[in-house]
Amino acid sequence: MDDLHMNDLSDIVAADRAHIWHHLMPHKSLETTDPRIIVEGKGMRVWDQHGKEHLDGVSGGVWTVNVGYGRTEIADAVRDQLVKMNYFAQTLGSVPGARFAERLIAKMPGMSRVFYANSGSEANEKAFKMVRQISARQHGGRKYKILYRDRDYHGTTIANLSAGGQDERNAQYGPFTPGFVRVPHCLEYRKQWDDVSGADYGRRAADAIEEVILREGPDTVGALCLEPITAGGGVILPPPGYWERVGEIVRKYDLLLHLDEVVCGVGRTGEWFGYQHYGIEPDFVTMAKGVASGYAAISCMVTSERVFEMFKDVPDDHLGYFRDISTFGGCTAGPAAALENMAIIEREDLLANCAAMGERLMGNLHELAERHAVIGDVRGKGLFCGAELVSDRTDRTPAEEARVKAVVADCMEQGVVIGASNRSMPGFNNTLLFSPALIATADDIDAITDSVDRALGRVF
Ligand code: PLP
């Protein structure tokens, strides 16, 4: 660490207080406490303005810094690229853009084209627009509806909120974009069909998608947009049988399958992509957070060649191509950082580490559940885990929001950062979230769960 954090940062705190609009934050909480300024990071750890060290159990708060902090090799690659050629609109090409696309596609059999943008929301919008354009061109505009799932989240723009399954995020921001239709979530712990369980539950939850298609009219539904594993909605792994049935439905109704890998993507679950655990064949894959681990702003909307073919220029048809641009999709910092990020994951065998450390994290959480009755359910894949808190294990009453927050705050006091799920409907924001960087060691994992152990003991 250099000694920046030892300097007097009161002027920075004052500037932050006066001028920063913190994301997702009720600012009332800053009336009584100072904003926390993160000054420096190295590996799994960050330091705040008081020099306090925090073990980061959530990769920069929102599943982003997959390869950890202070990676000089990424910074050097970005610097070298920016000095040589920083930007030209992606209407033309760039060296790192082409190289990263080639490396990325090599990890995604069946996919073929990369559209660069800046955020997960933006990447998802691109896919939504393609669905609409395909509907317009091939189905006379009829097959325009996009199905999304309760509890999933796809981003912050009005169209993404229209596809958003977390009601708290949507309240007061309507009216929304027409043509987005909700299907039920698939979390068996919060059962919606009492007569089935296990793989039958997975198939039943997917059957619910077919029911919505039949209700809406199959010729009106163009696409299904899903998170492979729901992230902020509570770490929801589709039950066995779910994806197989989804695949059947997609084929039966000729739907385009859009998988939002903004969280799962680029190693978080121990595979390059979350969907690769399930043998699914998507038409669109969107990704953002882990693509460059937060060293540059980059997102990708990746399509199959089948989709690309649909947009091949038709002679004498000036509307036949995808008429879309993202200004900073042409900034070379993104793919330069992404290339080095991917090289680090390979060089350091971080997919294997993620899988192994994920097992350890799950094991520790299960062990905690034996001693803390407040843990009702433990879920996860790789370093993407959640522990759902309940005030009563028998009827699964969700733990009070204030207490869930108190656990997160207690861990923060102990110098460990963990997260909590977003509210989907009252009472469903009760899952602790864990997503350490893929470089986590066994000691890091144990330190995270030890702090949760102490916090649960104090709060409950
Ligand atoms: N999709 C998922 C699954 C997300 O979790 C998020 C953000 O948390 C997004 C999309 C939106 O990404 P961004 O904030 O980069 O627009």
Image (cartoon, grey):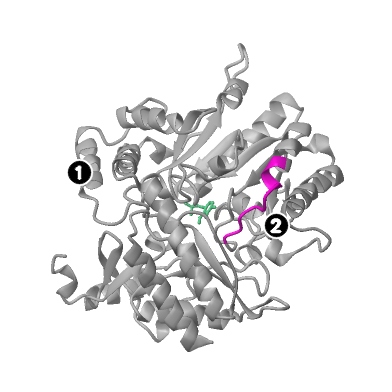
Residue at (23%, 47%) from the top-left corner? 75
Residue bounds of the magenta highlight: 235-244
Question: Is residue 138 found inside the magenta-colored segment of the image?
Answer: no
**Amino acid type for the residue under numbered disc 1:** Asp
**Amino acid type for the residue under numbered disc 2:** His
Along the horizontal axis of the image, is 391 left or right of 358? right
Dot 2 alpha-carbon crowd within 10 angstroms: few under 14, some 14 to 19, many 20 or more: many
Q: Quadrant of the N terminus?
A: bottom left
Residue 340 in view, yes or no: yes
Task: Answer above or below: position of 319 versus 455.
Answer: above
* Residue 422 in picture, x, y percent from top left: 57, 67
In the rendered image, which quarter is residue 58 located in?
A: bottom left
* Residue 307 in picture, x, y percent from top left: 60, 26
Q: In the displayed orientation, state which residue is furthest to the top.
A: 315
Task: Answer above or below: position of 148 versus 347.
Answer: below
Along the horizontal axis of the image, is 76 left or right of 118? left
Dominant secondary structure of the residues highlighted in magenta in the image: loop
Kind of element beneath mark 1:
helix
* Residue 296 in picture, x, y percent from top left: 33, 47
State the residue position of label 1. Answer: 76
Q: Nearer the viewer, residue 236 or 182?
A: 236
Q: Which mark is residue 185?
A: 2
Kind of element beneath mark 2:
loop
Residue at (61%, 37%) from the top-left corner? 280
Q: Quadrant of the C terminus?
A: bottom right
Separation of residues labelled 1 and 2 (CA atoms) = 43 Å
Residue at (58%, 38%) from the top-left corner? 127
Task: Answer above or below: position of 429 versus 442.
Answer: below
Q: How many marks?
A: 2
